[in-house]
Image: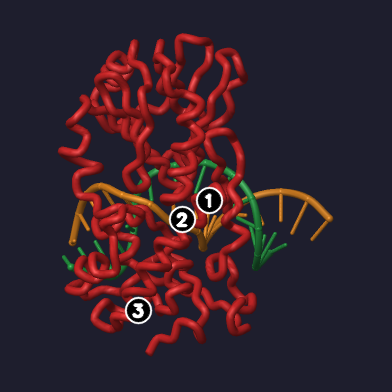
Chain colours: A red, B green, C orange
Amino acid sequence: MPELPEVETIRRTLSKLVIGKTVADVIVGLPRLIKAPDDVMQFVELLKGQTIREIGRRGKFLLFCLDDYVLVSHLRMEGRYGLYRTGDEVEKHTHVIFRFTDETELRYKDVRTFGTMHLFPKGQEMAGPPLHKLGPEPLDEAFSAAVLKERLERRKTKIKPLLLNQEIIVGLGNIYVDEALFQAGIHPEKTPDELTDDQWEKLHVSIVQILQKSISLGGSSIKSYVNGQGEAGRFQHTLKAYGRTGEPCFVCGTLIEKFVVGGRGTHICPNCQPRN
DNA sequence: AGGGCACCTCGGGCGC
DNA sequence: TGCGCCCGAGGTGCCC
């Protein structure tokens, strides 16, 4: 489940592998993944001859910056990239192959086919979906407890679904929201008007610390995630709430509980994260 | 605005 | 014990 730390890790590993390579051909096995341009043949033709200059990230999106175009890629649940040699056996669930001029190729695999790719002329990628409405980057210097509070305080719904909303803040998914709320001692069903200034501060610090620590450990490998070189992350060994249902809280020993909030499996310590 | 479902596949768990 | 079925996993878009 790639969230910000996993996408950032993939960005860093892939950068070392494919920057400077030139696209010779593209094979699209599942046209449904290509959302722009409308015509998949055009997607292929526009990419031919383009060299990858840089790989960026915006929230959970990877941005492959080419000479004249930007390829915006979202991995959703289980998308992954890997560099292969032309002629290597094509593994199951490989849906897009970017064949380079040097006999290597970048392959996109996605078991659940939820991932998306948009190709835009350079400079137009922020003008429309899927990037145009995204909220601030939590690891930008400009992001603060005050910004977080300002963006949330007039909303009436529960804090957890708000933190998952990429228009409010980008990068958090189910795992890191549960971890941040645990570290901040905030119940996921609290509404913004119930939070104290101290809790806004704790929530901001928790979000930043958890994302930074996970990036430093190469992300979390819960089920299927690997970086651009097929390597697992290590942050999953440090999780304190997510996936620990029925196990004792590391802080107080109370058993971690799981229930559904906003349709998402949610893990809390009922003692450290009181409802009232 | 917010809740709920659809999208999709696999694997685990449960029932017979 | 083995097989088969159902459901849970969750990021996001869309519909109501």
Query: What residue did someone put label 3 on?
Result: A199
On residue A216, the disc is: 1
Query: What residue did someone put label 2 on?
Result: A212
Q: Residue at x 32, y 72 (%)?
A: A159
Q: Residue at x 41, y 50 (%)?
A: A4
> Could you tell which of marks 3 and 1 lies nearer the N-terminus?
3
Q: Is residue A218 above or below residue A93?
A: below
Local secondary structure at mark 2: helix
* Image quadrant assignment for residue A156: bottom left
**Label 3 is found on which chain of the structure?**
A
**Label 2 is found on which chain of the structure?**
A
> A117 or A276: which is nearer to us?
A276
Mark 2, Cα crowd under 10 Å, few <14 / some 14-19 / many 20+, is some
| Distance of label 2 from label 1 (alpha carbons) | 6 Å
Whether pointer 3 and pointer 2 mark residues with C-beta atoms closer than 8 Å, the reply is: no
Local secondary structure at mark 1: helix
Q: Is residue A76 above or below residue A175?
A: above
Work out whether disc 3 and disc 1 sit on a shared chain. yes
Mark 3, Cα crowd under 10 Å, few <14 / some 14-19 / many 20+, is some
- Residue A195, percent from left and from top: 30, 81
Whether residue A216 is visible here, answered yes or no, is yes
> A55 or A161: which is nearer to us?
A55
